[in-house]
Amino acid sequence: MMSGRMHRGWPGGRGRGPGRGGWQQADLPGADDAAAWLQGRLPDGWFTSAPEVTVDREEILIVGELPPVEGEFADTEAGRADRAAAVAGRISRFRESTREERIEIARQAEHRYQRKVAWGARIGDTVELFTVASVPVMTRLRQPERIVLDTLVDSGVARSRSDALAWAVRLVGQHADEWLGELREAMARVDELRAKGPTGGTEQ
């Protein structure tokens, strides 16, 4: 039986109502049960184990593990290239053979959770994502921050300021995962306390 694993890009996958601070967002349906809903909705046999489900304000990303490729591959440059080609072919076969059903599942999930749905597949250390959302984010940066981005561009690490900003965000996510997790938990606790507090209104 498949048991969903859910990684939250935001606590509970919920949007926030108006209020102070930069993290509030317009209300969205809760997505706490997204992994469980997918557990019941995904066909048996698609993945070898429960898919990883990641939720943020805009998107639900579903990444499942496929069976390993069969056959022996020599530990040589040619053998490794052959194995990589076999893995790419296996993922491509899954993508094509499940396309119509994935579209229907995504349509239902998007209606239920008001977020786009993207898919991915994994074999070992190889992960391929299908049509994930690229969401523009507007921001204002002071000169020291712009200099950091321009240094990344000038050195060839990034192609543009927007690419450099995305690179920096990925780097923070990789090296501050524990801290970000604690921050999300603290924010979820704030939501719980706010829900328990007085509404400030007068009962009619």
Image (spheres, rainbow, N blue to C red):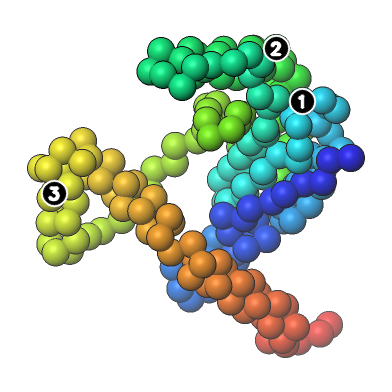
Give me the C-alpha separation between circle 2 and circle 1.
11 Å
Three-letter amino acid code at the position of disc 1: Trp
**Vertical relation: 19 (above or below) 125:** below
**Vertical relation: 84 (above or below) 200:** above
Three-letter amino acid code at the position of disc 2: Ser
Residue 171: give x, y in percent of width and height: 36, 53
Q: Which residue is mark 3?
A: 150
Q: Residue at x 59, y 32 (%)?
A: 124
Secondary element under disc 3, as helix, strand or loop, is helix
Given residues 160 and 16, the one toward you in this image is 160
Q: Earlier in the sequence, mark 2 or mark 1?
A: 1
Q: Mark 1 and mark 2 in contact (Cβ < 8 Å)?
A: no
Secondary element under disc 1, as helix, strand or loop, is loop
Residue 188: give x, y in percent of width and height: 64, 72
Q: Which residue is mark 1?
A: 46
Residue 146: give x, y in percent of width and height: 16, 56
Q: Which mark is residue 97?
A: 2
Of tags 2 and 1, the one toward the viewer is 1
